[in-house]
Image: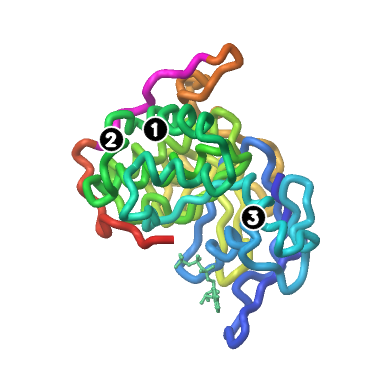
Amino acid sequence: MIRFDSVSKAFPGGQRAAVTDLTFEVERGEFVFLVGPSGSGKSTVLRLVLREDVPSSGDVHVLGQDLRAIPGSKVPHYRRNLGMVFQDFRLLPQKTVRENVAYALQVLGRSRGLIAEAVPDVLKTVGLAGMQDRFPHELSGGEQQRVAIARAVVNRPAILLADEPTGNLDPDTSRGIMKLLSRINANGTTVVMATHDQSIVDEHRLRVIELAEGAIVRDERSGVYQPELVEPAQAPVQGAVRESSRRRTIADSMADRITARDLGLRTPDGDAGTDADAPDSTARGAKGETGTTR
Ligand SMILES: Nc1ncnc2c1ncn2[C@@H]1O[C@H](COP(=O)(O)OP(=O)(O)OP(=O)(O)O)[C@@H](O)[C@H]1O
């Protein structure tokens, strides 16, 4: 689904390459945490998948496509396969919740009928059914992030990229956002999430790829944020770098398998699901309540 072959990326004037000789593969349906200190290259990896940057050397393949071979004019079409969520939400401040989500479909030329159906569905999925006429400044940080996630998945992308999606949120709100991302993953969307959130990584024990100074220093099937901080008895067996090709989805660590109906997605019989988790009614933990406009 995502394959990096000896990928390096250097920026002009940089003291060192942003990423160096990255080789890894993410399989369909996986949930992968990208961890590492600030400046270690996590966002660069996401930008390479998004085709916002191209490697200085090496190749990136996503969904069977060699990203280097996609001409600039075809990049927007390629990106229809991807959803992206950012730490600072990046909602359009002059648009309501409904309009923010609908806009993602309007720019793809989707019909009014489809938009009228899909937007309420996805808002229900993210637990914001009653808030569609609010503006971003009338929402908590957690609610704004739910809108951003709704916007990212309303077109049902195969891959969701999240760059520190809980970075501006308090711990409880972060847990709610992670639960939502887990549900989206359990329904088949591959998720790659860059994060500094130790408790979320440690709670979920999913695949962890750790970067340091642009290189992969750890790739664990069922990892923690920082193995040396975990008691030896609890520490998972560390796999060698690149040993983690076994597909591990969040469903592996969830007792209750979640169905499309739970997610509010349309099932083959056209039925829509039930509400997902309630929105973070107490979530006023955002540092930056209104994201920047994209
Ligand atoms: N457009 C750019 N031009 C020059 N250097 C860049 C550019 N983008 C990233 N870098 C450099 O590449 C390195 C990796 O940056 P990147 O943003 O990928 O790190 P990160 O792990 O995502 O950091 P953080 O956790 O702070 O978001 C850093 O040294 C950064 O300064």
> Mark 3: which secondary structure?
helix
**Do tag 1 and tag 3 residues touch (Cβ < 8 Å)?**
no
**Do tag 2 and tag 1 residues touch (Cβ < 8 Å)?**
yes
- Measured along the vertical axis of the image, is residue 198 above or below residue 150? below
Tell me the magenta residue range. 271-280
Residue 213 position in % (x across, y down): 56, 72
Look at mark 2 in the image and give the residue it sits on.
131
Look at mark 1 in the image and give the residue it sits on.
123
Q: Name the residue rendered at 55%, 15% in the picture.
A: 270
Residue 245 position in % (x across, y down): 71, 43
Nearest to N terminus: mark 2 or mark 1? 1
Nearest to N terminus: mark 2 or mark 3? 3
Separation (CA) of disc 2 from disc 3: 30 Å
User: In terms of secondary structure, what is the magenta stretch mainly?
Assistant: loop
> Label 3 sits on what residue type?
Pro
Report the front residue among 237 and 215. 215
- Left or right of 286? Residue 145 is right
